[in-house]
Image: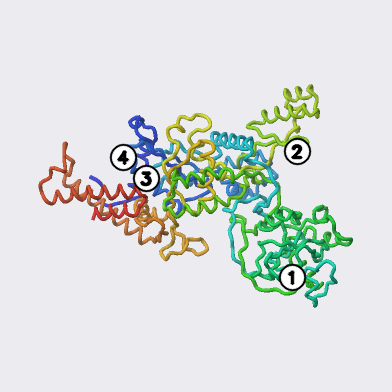
C-alpha cells in the first residue's frame, strides 16, 4: 500500500534514482533501435551556475516534450551538458585563490592556473547538473558533455581551422567591448546598459583661420559630448548634410582644443540636427558609431586609452603625429591618469581657456560589464573575427523558406532584424580558461593556423625555408629537435568566445568530427527550446554553423518561451529581493508541483507570473492525484486482461471513456502545437 501522506521529497528522490539506475531515459535502448528518433539538446547552463526559474521553466518544457515522445514510442535523446563559461569560471577560481591567500593567476602561470580550474571543475562543476536532476529532467545523463571535453575541443579546433582556410575567420583591428577590470573583450550579451544621471558638455572647437574668441560665435563650432576624456582622440567634427546652419563649414577644418590637432568638418547623416548642438565630435577609436563614420570618411583612428582605462599619450605615435610644439607637455601631464579623473582635469582646462560653453544635466545609458560592474570602453584592438555576414545568408534563407520555424512566429522578425544587419563576430577573448586559438606566429609575425602544433611547425618551416629565412638544413634540424625550434613560432595566447563552442552544440555533442554514427541518427535535432534573450548569441550561430558544416538546419522548430516574473509581474532580480528560488520551492512543495505550475502558466507569448501560492495550489492538485491512486489501490482497482473501454455499457463508464479519449486528443494536439498551458489545463480539467 502506498503511503498515506503525499511526501514529494521522499517520493521524487526515490523515483529519480530508479529512473537513472534503470537507464529509463537512455537513447538507443534495444527495444527502440528501429523507432524514429526524437532529439533535443539542452541549452548548456554555465558550469558555474545554479538553478534559477528560467532553467526550471526551460527544462520543464523540454521534459514534457521528451516524455511525451517516449510515450509515443520514439527513441528520444535529450542531450545534456554544461558550458565552460570562460569569464565566469576564471573569475570564480581567481576569487577562490585570493580568499585562500594563495598565489594569483599571474604568479601561478598559465599551465598551473588551468590545473586549478580543472580541479575546481571536478570538485564543484556538477552542482547545476545535480539540481537539474532534482527538477526531474529526464535527460540521457550517460551522454553528458562539457564544452571543454576532449571531443568538443576537437570539434572547435577543426571548425576554426576550416573557417580560416575558407577566409571566414580572419584577424582585424576593430572596436570591441573592452572590460578594463577583466582586461578582455566581451560580447554584447555580457554588457549591461545602465541609465545614469550624467551631463552633456558643450565644447567650442575653434575654426581654422579664425582667431578664437569665446564671445564670437563665428570663430568656433560647438559640439556636445558625454565623454570629454575621449576628445583627445578626435579626428573630425561631423554635421548633418541637410543642416543649413553648418553647410558653409563642411570641407573646412577645426582646431582640437587643448591638443591643437587640425581636424576636418565632414557631412554625415549620423549627426542628428535635433540633438545637442547638431554637431558631434568624431572619435573613431572610442565609439562604435564614430568608428563607422571614420571608415566612411577615411579618418585616422587615434586611441588615447590603454587596456586599464588610463590615458596613454606619451609615445603614442597616432596621438602625437602632426601636433604643434608644446603639445607634448599636456601628454606628459595626463599620461597614465584614470579616464574619469582625466575627464575632470580636461573639463577644468577647457573651462580655463574658454572652450567649455555650457553643461546640461543628461540622463543616458552607459554600458557596464555584467560581471565586473565597471564601465565598458569601446577599444580599438586586434582580434579574431568570423565573417558572420556570409555565414548568415543561408541561415536567413532557411527561416524564410520555412526549413526552420519560430514558435511564436513573431520572433522571426527579431531574428531577421539582427541577421540582416549582422556585424563581424569577435571570437577572441584575453583569458586563459577556454579553447586556446589554434594560431601560431612566426618571427616576422606571419600567422600559421593548424589543428596541431606539429602541423603549424611543419607549415612554418616550409614557408621560411622557401623564403630563405632558414636553410634547408636548419629546417630539418628543427623538425627533428623540439629544443632547436623552441621559440621559433609562438602560439596565440587568446582563447575563443564561449559562444563559439556552444554554436556547434547540436552536432559536436554527437561525436562530430570523430564517430558520426550518432550524428547520422540524431542530427538534425527536432526542436530547440530556449529564451528570447539568446536568439542572437546562440540560436542564430547554431543555425550558421549547422548549415555550413552539416549542410542541414540544426532544428526545424525553435520554441521561444518568455520570462518567469514575480507574482506582481516584475522581473526577478536580487536587488529587488523578489527572486523566487526554485530549489526552495522544490523543498517546500516538490518538483512536480513547481513543474505543473510552470506548465499551466506557459502560454505562448506571455510572461509567467509565479508565486509560492500558485505552486502550493498545484501541490494540492498532486495530493488529490495521490489520494485518488491510494483510493484505487485500497479498492483493488486493477486493469483486467483484455479490457476494452469501447464495450462499456453503463452511462457513467461510457462518459468517462469519452472524456479520456477527448483529453488524450486535447493534450496531444496542444503539445504538438507547443501550447503547454492548454495541455496542462486539459489534464487538470479531466482529473477534476
The residue labelled by disc 4 is 72
- Residue drawn at 53 percent across, 50 percent down: 536
Q: Residues within 10 Å of mark 4 (few under 14, many from 20)?
A: few
Q: Residues within 10 Å of mark 1 (few under 14, many from 20)?
A: many
Please state which of the two labelled residues, at mark 3 or mark 1, is closer to the viewer: 1
First of labels 2, 1 by sequence position = 1
* Quadrant where the N terminus is found in the figure: top left
Q: Residue furthest right?
A: 325
x then y, percent, for residue 529: 43, 48
- Residue drawn at 50 percent across, 54 percent down: 414
* Cα–Cα span, label 4 and label 1: 71 Å
The residue labelled by disc 2 is 445
Residue at disc 3, secondary structure: helix
* Cα–Cα span, label 3 and label 2: 52 Å
x then y, percent, for residue 277: 69, 71
Residue 122 visible (yes or no): no
Image marks 3 and 1: residues in contact by CB distance under 8 Å = no
* Cα–Cα span, label 3 and label 1: 61 Å
Image marks 4 and 2: residues in contact by CB distance under 8 Å = no
The residue labelled by disc 1 is 222
Left or right: where does residue 426 sit relative to residue 653? right
First of labels 4, 1 by sequence position = 4
Seen in the picture, residue 432 relative to 202 is either above or below; the reply is above
Query: Tag on residue 65?
Result: 3
**Count of numbered circles on the image:** 4
Amino acid at each position: 500500500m502506498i503511503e498515506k501522506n503525499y511526501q514529494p521529497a521522499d517520493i521524487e528522490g526515490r523515483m529519480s534514482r530508479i529512473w537513472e539506475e534503470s537507464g529509463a531515459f537512455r537513447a538507443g535502448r534495444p527495444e527502440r533501435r528501429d523507432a524514429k528518433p526524437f532529439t533535443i539538446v539542452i541549452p548548456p547552463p554555465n558550469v558555474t551556475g545554479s538553478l534559477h526559474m528560467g532553467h526550471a521553466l526551460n527544462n520543464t518544457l523540454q521534459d514534457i516534450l521528451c516524455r511525451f515522445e517516449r510515450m509515443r514510442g520514439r527513441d528520444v535523446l535529450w542531450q545534456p551538458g554544461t558550458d565552460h563559461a570562460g569569464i565566469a569560471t576564471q573569475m570564480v577560481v581567481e576569487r577562490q585563490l585570493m580568499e585562500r591567500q594563495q598565489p594569483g593567476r599571474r604568479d601561478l602561470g598559465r599551465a598551473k592556473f588551468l590545473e586549478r580550474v580543472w580541479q575546481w571543475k571536478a570538485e564543484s562543476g556538477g552542482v547545476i547538473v545535480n539540481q537539474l536532476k532534482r527538477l526531474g529532467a529526464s535527460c540521457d545523463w550517460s551522454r553528458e558533455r562539457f564544452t571543454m571535453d576532449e571531443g568538443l575541443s576537437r570539434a572547435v579546433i577543426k571548425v576554426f581551422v576550416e573557417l580560416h582556410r575558407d577566409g571566414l575567420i580572419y584577424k582585424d583591428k576593430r572596436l570591441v567591448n573592452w572590460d578594463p577590470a577583466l582586461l578582455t573583450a566581451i560580447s554584447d550579451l555580457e554588457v549591461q546598459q545602465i541609465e545614469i544621471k550624467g551631463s552633456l558638455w558643450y565644447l567650442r572647437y575653434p575654426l581654422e583661420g579664425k582667431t578664437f574668441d569665446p564671445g564670437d560665435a563665428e570663430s568656433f563650432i560647438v559640439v556636445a559630448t558625454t565623454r570629454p576624456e575621449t576628445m583627445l582622440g578626435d579626428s573630425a567634427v561631423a554635421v548633418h548634410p541637410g543642416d543649413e546652419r553648418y553647410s558653409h563649414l563642411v570641407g573646412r577644418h577645426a582646431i582640437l582644443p587643448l591638443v591643437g590637432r587640425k581636424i576636418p568638418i565632414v557631412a554625415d547623416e549620423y549627426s542628428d540636427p535635433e540633438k545637442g548642438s547638431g554637431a558631434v565630435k568624431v572619435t573613431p577609436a572610442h565609439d562604435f558609431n564614430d568608428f563607422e563614420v571614420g571608415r566612411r570618411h577615411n579618418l585616422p583612428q587615434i586611441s588615447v586609452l590603454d587596456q586599464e582605462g588610463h590615458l596613454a599619450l606619451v609615445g603614442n605615435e597616432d596621438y602625437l603625429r602632426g601636433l604643434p610644439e608644446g603639445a607634448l607637455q599636456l601628454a606628459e601631464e595626463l599620461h597614465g591618469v584614470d579616464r574619469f579623473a582625466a575627464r575632470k582635469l580636461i573639463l577644468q582646462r577647457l573651462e580655463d581657456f574658454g572652450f567649455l560653453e555650457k553643461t546640461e544635466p543628461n540622463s543616458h545609458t552607459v554600458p557596464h560589464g555584467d560581471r565586473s560592474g565597471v564601465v565598458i570602453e569601446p577599444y580599438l584592438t586586434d582580434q579574431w573575427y568570423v565573417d558572420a555576414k556570409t555565414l548568415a545568408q543561408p541561415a536567413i534563407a532557411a527561416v524564410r523558406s520555412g526549413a526552420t520555424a519560430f514558435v511564436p512566429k513573431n520572433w522571426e522578425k527579431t531574428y531577421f532584424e539582427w541577421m540582416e544587419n549582422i556585424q563581424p563576430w569577435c571570437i577572441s577573448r584575453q583569458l586563459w580558461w577556454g579553447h586556446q586559438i589554434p594560431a601560431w606566429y612566426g618571427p616576422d609575425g606571419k600567422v600559421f593556423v593548424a589543428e596541431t602544433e606539429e602541423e603549424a611547425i611543419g607549415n612554418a618551416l616550409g614557408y621560411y625555408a622557401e623564403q630563405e629565412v632558414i636553410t634547408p638544413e636548419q629546417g630539418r634540424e628543427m623538425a627533428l629537435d623540439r629544443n632547436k625550434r623552441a621559440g621559433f613560432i609562438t602560439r596565440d595566447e587568446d582563447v575563443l568566445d564561449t559562444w563559439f563552442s556552444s554554436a556547434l552544440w547540436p552536432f559536436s555533442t554527437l561525436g562530430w568530427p570523430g564517430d558520426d554514427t550518432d550524428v547520422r541518427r540524431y542530427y538534425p535535432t527536432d526542436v530547440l527550446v530556449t529564451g528570447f534573450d539568446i536568439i542572437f548569441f546562440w540560436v542564430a550561430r547554431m543555425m550558421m554553423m549547422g548549415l555550413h558544416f552539416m549542410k542541414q538546419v540544426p532544428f526545424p522548430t525553435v520554441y521561444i518561451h518568455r520570462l518567469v516574473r514575480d507574482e506582481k509581474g516584475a522581473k526577478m532580480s536580487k536587488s529587488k529581493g523578489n527572486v523566487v528560488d526554485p530549489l526552495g520551492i522544490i523543498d517546500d512543495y516538490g518538483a512536480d508541483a513547481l513543474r505543473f505550475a510552470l506548465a499551466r502558466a506557459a502560454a505562448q507569448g506571455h510572461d509567467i507570473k509565479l508565486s509560492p501560492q500558485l505552486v502550493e495550489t498545484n501541490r494540492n492538485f498532486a495530493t488529490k492525484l495521490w489520494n485518488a491512486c491510494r483510493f484505487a489501490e485500497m479498492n483493488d482497482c486493477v486493469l483486467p486482461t483484455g479490457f476494452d473501454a469501447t464495450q462499456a455499457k453503463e452511462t457513467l463508464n461510457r462518459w468517462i471513456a469519452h472524456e479520456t479519449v477527448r483529453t488524450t486528443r486535447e493534450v496531444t494536439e496542444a503539445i504538438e502545437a507547443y501550447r503547454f498551458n492548454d495541455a496542462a489545463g486539459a489534464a487538470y480539467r479531466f482529473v477534476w
